[in-house]
Amino acid sequence: MTAPSSMESALRASRDAGRKLLVPYVTGGLGDDWMRVVEAVSAAGADAVEIGIPFSDPVMDGPVIQQASQRALAAGATPVSILADVARIDAGIPLVVMTYYNIVFRSGHVRFAESLAAHGVSGAIVPDLPLIELDGWADAADSAGVDTILLAAPNTPDRTLAAICRRTRGWVYGVALMGVTGERSALASSAGVLGRRLKAVTDKPVLIGVGVSTPAQAAEAAADADGVIVGSALVRRLLEGAGPDGAAAFVAELRAGLDGG
């Protein structure tokens, strides 16, 4: 059995102390103050922050995050510039990047993994890289000390679900519903089902994301898991000009919902 990483150990400790985990998503390069947004949501109660590296063809992302990525790209954001900015963030919690395999492949597995580690990144989510094609990247990431966080979908067969849980590092990302990211008026029933299925086969932290949009939905999703990832609902507020203070206020509301407040 692989020893837990420092990020996984920290998340496990928080979970085992009775805390529901909260990971907000922030699009890297979205506005001049995006690094302050990351620091603000950290101070407001996040346990880690997922930072999106903007990409021109984000197949998992819905309209809100696509718009944020396009705005960041138009402002000149690149993988190199985002990582340089990440190295300057003083968050005090793990920072994870979410990107697509085209960026990883063009950089090279070892070079990209080592660059993430050198810039203070704890983990990476590469949603378009399937488990059966993972080894080149994941081996390089393991060697660099970067957690590869794998996704599990509602239609993932039990055998594959168990394999994903064995290979993931940091946490396992349960995708609440089929489709792209985006806010929903109600939490999909598949979120609870998937949370329970994952908890039955792994002791690694189980976080549910995609379609988790409000404090009430966060609490509902976390009831069958260890916590939640919230992206589009936060990014929409940033697109509307919320800034660090508005982002912190929303994350504080999510935190209160998870804490039962």
Image: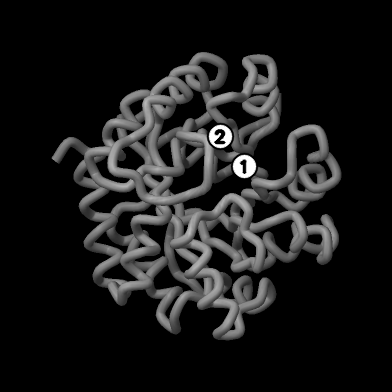
- Secondary structure type for disc 1: loop
Q: Residue at x 64, y 18 (%)?
A: 157
Q: Residue pushed farthest left?
A: 261
Residue 51: percent from left, percent from top: 52, 61
Does 137 appear above or below 198? below
Does 140 appear above or below 39? above
Foreground pick, 226 / 219:
219
Q: What residue is shown with label 1?
A: 149
Does 167 appear above or below 134? above
Q: What residue is shown with label 2?
A: 172
Q: Residue at x 70, y 49 (%)?
A: 145
Q: Is label 1 in contact with label 2 (beta carbons under 8 Å)?
A: yes
Foreground pick, 204 / 257:
257
Residue 176, label in figure = none
Q: Amino acid at mark 2?
A: Val
- Secondary structure type for disc 2: strand
Q: Quadrant of residue 227?
A: top left
Query: Which comes sooner in the sequence, label 1 or label 2?
Result: 1
Q: Amino acid at mark 1?
A: Ile
Q: Quadrant of the N terminus?
A: top right
Q: Quadrant of the C terminus?
A: top left
